[in-house]
Image (tube, grey):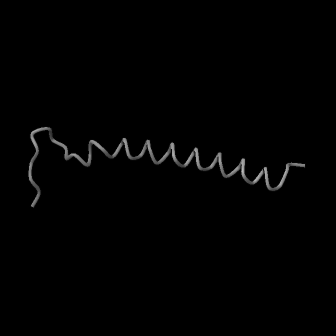
């Protein structure tokens, strides 16, 4: 049984876009760091 919020959306629904943005930023940063690390180990020809 779901409780009805006056706003019409649960706190999770309000936080979810922020979590997606944080996850995307983390993935982009980690991906870039990983590429730089691999290039440092294996220099591009």
Q: Nearer the viewer, residue 1 or 25?
A: 25
Q: Nearer the viewer, residue 32 or 41?
A: 41
Going by the image, does 27 lie left or right of 38? left
Residue 30: percent from left, percent from top: 59, 49
Q: Residue at x 38, y 46 (%)?
A: 19
Q: Which residue is pictured at 19% across the width and 47% down the height?
A: 10
| Left or right placement of residue 10 versus residue 15 in this view | left
- Residue drawn at (57%, 45%) of the image: 28
Reply above or below: 2 against 29: below
Give the image location of residue 23, x and y in percent. 46, 48
What residue occupies the far bottom of the structure in this picture? 1
Q: Position of residue 8 (x, y in %)?
A: 15, 41
Residue at horizontal 75 percent and vertical 54 percent from the top: 38
Taking 19 as reference, is 38 left or right?
Answer: right
Where residue 36 appears, as percent x and y from the top left, is 72, 47
Q: How many callouts does the rendering have? A: 0
Q: Residue furthest top?
A: 7
Camera-nearest residue between 41 and 32: 41
* Left or right: 23 as drawn, with respect to 44: left
Task: Residue 15: name its quadrant.
Answer: top left
Look at the image and tell me in which quarter the N terminus lies: bottom left
């Amino acid at each position: 049984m779901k409780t009805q919020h006056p706003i019409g959306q649960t706190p999770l629904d309000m936080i979810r876009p922020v979590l997606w943005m944080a996850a995307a930023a983390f993935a982009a940063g980690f991906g870039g760091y990983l590429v730089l690390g691999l290039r440092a180990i294996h220099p591009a020809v």
